[in-house]
Amino acid sequence: MKIAIIGGGASGLSCAIAAGRKTAGKNAEIVIYESKDRVGKKLLATGNGRCNMFNLYARTEDYSSPDFVRDILSRYDAEAVRLFFQSIGLYTRADEEGRAYPLSNQASGVLDALRLECEHLGVKILCESEITDIKKQGKAFVLSDGRAYDKVVLACGGKAVAKNFGGYELLKGTGHTVTKLMPALTKLTVKDNTFTKQLKGIRHKANLKLYIDGKKITEENGELLFADYGLSGIAVMQLSSFVARHFRVSKTLPVAECDFVPSMSFGELCQATERICGYNKDMKAENLLTGFMPKKLGEAVIKSVGVPLSAAVSQLGTKDIKSIASACKSFKFEISALRPFDDAQVTSGGADLRDFDSNTLESKKVKNLYCCGELLDIDGPCGGYNLLWAFACGLAVGENLIN
Ligand SMILES: Cc1cc2nc3c(=O)[nH]c(=O)nc-3n(C[C@H](O)[C@H](O)[C@H](O)COP(=O)(O)OP(=O)(O)OC[C@H]3O[C@@H](n4cnc5c(N)ncnc54)[C@H](O)[C@@H]3O)c2cc1C
């Protein structure tokens, strides 16, 4: 039995290990093809070099297609992935939000564990070996390097920060459909960047709500980072997945509503600012919000409602206070675009799920051809969800390649 795994990333390496263990002593050959000079390069960049490997609280509903991921994630959940890594000598620790990292806090440790286990199992790794074509000859698959295999696993990853041939052409070439591709877990460009541009580099913890066609879709609490093009930061990246799914089918502009003082209600904020105005009558309006947010952000909010920064706070009436508090609590940005794939962590879109069996990830169109990880039209939020999906797919396919 000859098995080719195209792509030496998270899903390809875990697939090779699971297949290697299953086929031990069975005269099987497992080959990983990797276009880069070494496997797992993207893994090294994950979690800011720490690799957020999975999330203990991941639920199927957190993913773009809960019904499709259910079969795999019910068998290969966070605990199964944790035990898999433990079996190859890699131990993890999770934070209070369920984000699991290697005990070493080094992504390189995760890659080393996977790579060494592949070596130990006799998996052949061919680097700088990009596959650009797959042909069917009878029952065999003949790859662009001329070698023939009984089974092929496509584990080529997505378009996010990928500069190689990728797997989409291989999917199309073997008769599969690729859905519209959009960057996800990325930054957002706003239609009018006057506000964000002047605040470039400023960070602030906020509550963000996403509205699409007037309907609230999701909300996030977390860091907001202003940029010349628009909005960045973890909370924004989480919203971006929903924006990507929307832009795949519609051109209407979503709205991000920011609450810069989420710990207070509108009424409490009005009262607090009124008290400050009454207490220090000589204070200039530019300082009114410094107790609630970074000074520059406070100034920009005050300017946005037409109050001069040089005005003495004693001159502000109830109407001014209410409009300042309202801008603090619900500052709206129209989202005009997602930042490009180079800025994204994952791809929204990919192999059409209707072409693959959700239990085995085998193609319904081409027997013995499988698809794993980000290449499938599945994406999850930030926090270990995408690597969990990639590892789970790899293990599921690898363990079931040979019965
Ligand atoms: C900066 C960054 C940080 C991230 N951090 C996290 C995180 O902390 N936690 C998390 O859950 N997710 C994170 N992600 C997402 C996560 O890395 C991916 O979802 C995951 O790596 C997907 O695994 P995969 O095996 O499908 O693809 P990949 O890991 O991308 O592997 C695919 C491999 O296939 C190779 N390849 C592609 N085409 C071919 C070809 N034709 N022939 C041969 N080889 C080919 C590629 O070079 C690549 O090595 C992050 C992503 C980025 C970009």
Image: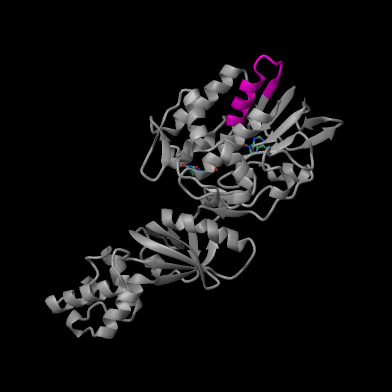
Q: Position of residue 246 (x, y in %)?
A: 59, 63
Q: Quadrant of residue 337?
A: bottom right
**The quarter of the picture showing ligand 1:** top right
Give the residue displayed 45% in from the left and 44% down from the top: 57
Task: Examine the structure image and report whether residue 27 is included in the region drawn in magenta.
Answer: yes
Residue in the picture at 63% in, 67% down:
250
| Name of the residue lying farthest toward the right | 138
Rendered-image quadrant of the C terminus: top right
Name the one closer to the observer, 2 or 215. Answer: 215
Quadrant of the frame with the N terminus: top right
Give yes or no for residue 322 being in the magenta stretch: no
- Report the number of numbered marks: 0
Q: Quadrant of residue 115?
A: top right
Q: Depth check: give the residue in front, 392 or 159.
A: 392
Which residue range is magenta in the image? 12-30
- From the image, give the main secondary structure of the stretch colored magenta: helix
